[in-house]
Image (tube, rainbow, N blue to C red):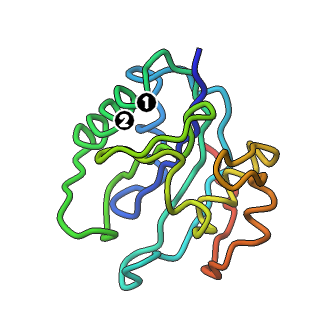
Amino acid sequence: MNIAYLLIGGNLGNRFANLQKAIQLIEQNCGQVVQSSAIYETEAWGITDQPAFYNQALKIETTFLPEELMKQLLFIEQEMGRIRTIKLGPRIIDLDMLFYNNIVLNKEDLILPHPALTERRFVLLPLSEIAPNLIHPVFQKTIEVLLKECPDLLDVQKLSIEG
């Protein structure tokens, strides 16, 4: 069984319901969600003139290879109505693969670990909740250390939402 860490998020529509729907579709199409962080509300990163995002980190067990898993995640985004128009723009759902086992991969359509995760507090904070001691295979630092070193100062707030 393979272990993948994902970050799911979105800032359009019912953000909480969209995360719940994404988790359901991930379990149906990708593998079992074995751990999930709290939900965090985050100021928009990149293009800041848009609604705040809800983000959540997931640990999943999957039988898919990395490229197959990425195809499934893109399929789920499409099924949920994501339309890719503006890079870093508003979206109903965004499913990012952060890590897959301990693999370092650099292909045109998939880079692992996710190349920007060390620069984004909204990724590292929820990830540190479920995998603080996970070691980044390129930087050889734990998620906890990467979070402490992260230069991103955007506001990331843990929410207390109950389904």
Residue kind at label 1, given as amino acid type: Pro
Front in this rendered view, residue 16 or 32: 32
Contact flag, marks 2 and 1 (Cβ < 8 Å): yes
The answer to whether residue 18 is visible is no
Q: CA distance from mark 2 to mark 1?
A: 6 Å
- Residue on which disc 2 sits: 70
- Residue on which disc 1 sits: 66
Residue 147's place in the image compared with 140, above or below, is below
Residue kind at label 2, given as amino acid type: Met
The crowding category of the residue bearing disc 1, from other C-alpha atoms within 10 Å (few below 14, some 14 to 19, many at least 20), is many
Residue 142 picture location, percent across and down: 78, 52
Front in this rendered view, residue 36 or 118: 118
Residue 66 picture location, percent across and down: 43, 30
Residue 40 picture location, percent across and down: 62, 60
The answer to whether residue 12 is visible is yes
Residue 53 located left or right of residue 124 = left
The residue at 56%/60% (across/down) is 117
For the N terminus, the quadrant is top right
Residue 114 picture location, percent across and down: 50, 52
Front in this rendered view, residue 49 or 87: 87
The residue at 57%/41% (across/down) is 99
For the C terminus, the quadrant is top right
The crowding category of the residue bearing disc 2, from other C-alpha atoms within 10 Å (few below 14, some 14 to 19, many at least 20), is some
Residue 76's place in the image compared with 142, above or below, is above
| Local secondary structure at mark 1 | helix
The residue at 27%/68% (across/down) is 87
Residue 116's place in the image compared with 25, above or below, is below
| Local secondary structure at mark 2 | helix
The residue at 58%/68% (across/down) is 120
